Amino acid sequence: MTQTWKDKLGDRIPADLGREIEIFENEIALRKQGKIDEKVFAETRLRRGAYGQRYDNGQRSDGTRTQILGYPSGELTKGPTTLWDAPGMQRIKIPYGGLTPVQLETLAELAEEYSDAILHVTTRQDIQLHYVHIEDTPSIFRRLAAAGITTREACGNTVRNVTGCPIAGVCRTETFDITPYARACSKFLLGHKDTQNFGRKFKVAFSGCAAEACGLAMLHDVGAVAKIEGGRRGFEFYVGGGLGSVPNQAKLFSGFLPEEELLPMVQAICRVFARLGEKKNRNTARLKFLVNKLGLEEFRRLVLEERKTLTPEPAWTGYLGDLGITDEKPLRPAKALNGQPKPEGFDDWRRTNVYAQRQAGYSVATVTLPLGDFSARQARALADAARRYTEGTVRLTVEQNLVVRWVSDADLPALYGDLRAMGLGEAGAGSIVDIAACPGTDTCKLGISSSRGLAGELRTRLASRFQEMDEAVRGLHIKISGCFNSCGQHHISDLGFYGVSRKKGSWTVPHFQVLVGGQWDHNAGAYGLGVIAVPSRNIPDVVDRMTAAFLRERTKDESFQSWIKRIGKAKVRSLLEDLTAIPAHETHPEYYQDWRDPREYSTGDMGVGECAGEVVSPIDFGLAAAEREAFEAQLTLEAGDLRKAADQALRSMATAARELVRTKSPVADELPEVVREFREKFFDTKLFWDPFAGGKFAQYFFTAVERPAADPTSDSVHRLVEEAQLFIEAAHSCRLKL
Amino acid sequence: MDLHKIVVKFFAADAASVKLDEFIPVFHRWIQKHAVEGMLIDVADYGHLEQGPGVVLVAHEADYFMDTMEGPLGLLYNRKASSAGLLSDRIAAAFKAALGACAKLQAEPEFQGRLRFRAGEALFLANDRLRAPNNDAAFQALRSDLAAALGRIYPSAVDLRRVSADPRSRLAVHVNSREPVADVTSLLARLG
């Protein structure tokens, strides 16, 4: 009988994880026999981090036509419209990004044997493998479990990876090391009975201080920022943050939550979320919607009531007696960098990639991972380097990089030499060239434009002149998402982009919406808003123009964000307006392709008529008007007139809806009629529905009309403007179907 | 040895003469035209990594990489799906698929004679640490099947050298023909 990984690894797999994996293996067998419903199986695999991937519905446009992918298992599915044999993505949770060399080596093995030899770091400190077959997942899980990693609850309506500042414990500005708290929280919530009945995912983040961005506490369902009060350890405790299509700044739940209250309070929040959170409509099911619906005060009251009912659990405080469990120690003595020979490029690398720890003589070295990727071979080489210079102290970052901690300063040149030898010696960590991007159209089912293609292109262009750049430009952040869902965190960068599309005649053209005004520092202290949609091909020009104008116009020491605020979004838009022009297909076919993808950007089955490039239909004019109105709402919001901005945002949605309705039947202009016709002809028929978001965007419109805010706040209008933009994007998508 | 996950790589004769980016449109075209066997799915671009899988034509049964991870640039064929027959047959089939892809790439108009693969040298990897760990026992167990397959491919004897003793790595064998070999197409012709 052939040996399996289960036989081979035996008792190296913790019993509880082994049992979990066995259950999943059985579910795979049952699904193959048709004894488990596909929806149930989908949730069960998602809860193990096994996602679907682009083209898993068995269709792919090859640029000339849509090809049917005839997998051997035929119609067997692993979820609705998700074919069994289609490659999938495996997400692997790495709590607070902490990895050992052995774990790096295991990940490398898995990437080689079951994936495409690539390890991809996400913006939430996970690792992702792509092109994985569902039937390989039990072996993957066992090998990970033997190395101390679980994929349990890496996806699905669960508590996702608990993230944390990657320099916790060695940071010069932290209040205290959040690592043991993040670890305890991750362990406590994993598989906890109170976290199994959510309507949507739940994300937790820890940060050691309020000023830096490392933990991004403000954009999580629960964000804990280390704080000491009266000599006691605790947390400034935030709830209801989140990015997604409509971002929400977290709200301060407690100015000081004592450390012993951390886990019970999170548990109480989980219980309230499970009990009162939306379950049917996944688009309004995140905690942020519940907090907004109830209001912070009522939400807090309910949570505190819930807290009183909890039966104490030993895990609440058990770990507090052993906070040193995550402490690290150096391998080599602290020694200053003093006169050692320095390899070429070392000084540039040191300037951007080395952080002096608070422990004198030691540094954190950031390994810049291009597009968040590293290969299996590089992973093994990194494991070797981590052992050579440190006790194996490595962490992943939310900027899709990796840090090696506790490097003796004297070893930095040698480490840099090793990194260069493995092809990972690039400078520019945390700079404008270190661009974060989600997988986008490369592998994600939701991707609209190629975020990685654009990131790669920008990276190449910017890196070629990085050394000559002004320091103020070097320090900017660029983040890119392939769609509105913000996995690339486009809302919290100086320049953010998310993928959209536009029609030009009967052609479809990949675009990116340009966002400005976001803030990376202060744990993602402010969210940017879209200013204008520009063809993908012109985005490098957007970056060049914006950075050049910033250098030209900034006052001394003015930040990019302050500059944007000062000049206003109308000026930004006017700077970029001409870049929205799409040249004719005949002369510039590259505009109709995405970056690093030579296929014609289209749905594949769309016909092309003569002179198509010149045809502009009334609906295209109408949708452009709606965009303009949404933008005006933004400007009004910026000026502080909340009521007027809310009215304008609603009007922009009404304009877009009216234009769609007019394609079906001429109607009067009055809003009630537009709403009625839109509901009947576009919502009820699902014509307006997004394949993945369903009717969410239409609901934004209905809610804005039917339940306008009596007393609009800055937050609520910001959200409404964002919703208006998304509604208009959805109208563009719907227009493609007409 | 019940090994099915087999990797074969042929190295480019002059890696500097081509750029990784150039393979992206070629692989997309292969999908359009079903130019190589198997159900072709997508193209993945990892050209931004210096020592990575390069550009990948992802398929259900096997992937085709223009790879820079396992040594210098070359075509790497990665068989994923199980197949029937003796191990030596499966190895020969993998070599045949790799050689076929090399020959096709050499003939693509984009490369205009710039791309040529070294036929006399190849890399074999057992991509399954459970069935073929990187140790001497596994190498010896594999050797006869590998030699039998290579006997069908190469007109003269070949030398087999285990590449590394690192137990973390895949079992990799460097294949070197003792006699010069003209071209990948001549090897392909021998396999029928």
Image: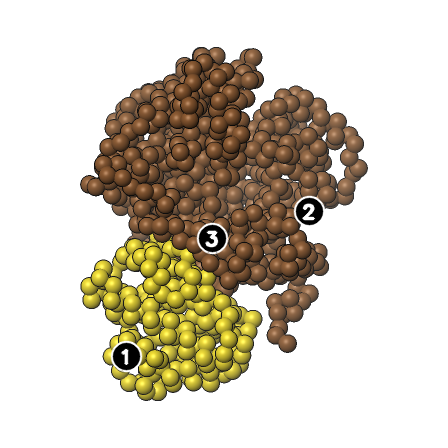
Q: Residue furthest bottom?
A: B157
Q: Is residue A329 visible?
A: no
Q: Where does label 3 land, which residue?
A: A58
Question: Is disc 3 surrounded by few (<14), some (14 to 19) or many (20+) residues within 10 Å?
Answer: many
Q: Mark 3, chain letter?
A: A
Q: Where does label 2 land, which residue?
A: A191
Write down the colour of chain A: brown
Query: Could you tell me residue A671's position as x and y percent?
Result: 47, 15
Question: Is disc 1 surrounded by few (<14), some (14 to 19) or many (20+) residues within 10 Å?
Answer: some
Q: Secondary structure at mark 2?
A: loop
Q: Look at 53% across and 30% down and name the residue there.
A: A684
Q: In this image, A229 relative to A541: left or right? A: right
Q: Which is in the foreground here, disc 2 or disc 3?
A: 3
Q: Quadrant of the C terminus of chain A?
A: top left
Q: Quadrant of the N terminus of chain A?
A: bottom right
Q: Look at 61% across and 74% down and name the residue there.
A: A2
Q: Mark 2, chain letter?
A: A
Q: In this image, A411 relative to A474: left or right? A: right
Query: Could you tell me residue A185's position as x and y percent?
Result: 65, 42
Disc with the residue nearer the chain's start (2 vs 3): 3
Task: Specify the color scheme.
Answer: by chain
Mark 2 vs mark 3: tell me if same chain: yes
Query: Could you tell me residue B101's position as x and y percent?
Result: 33, 68
Write down the colour of chain B: yellow
In contact (CB < 8 Å): disc 1 and disc 2: no
Q: Mark 1, chain letter?
A: B
Q: Which is in the foreground here, disc 1 or disc 3?
A: 3
> A126 or A6: nearer the eye?
A6
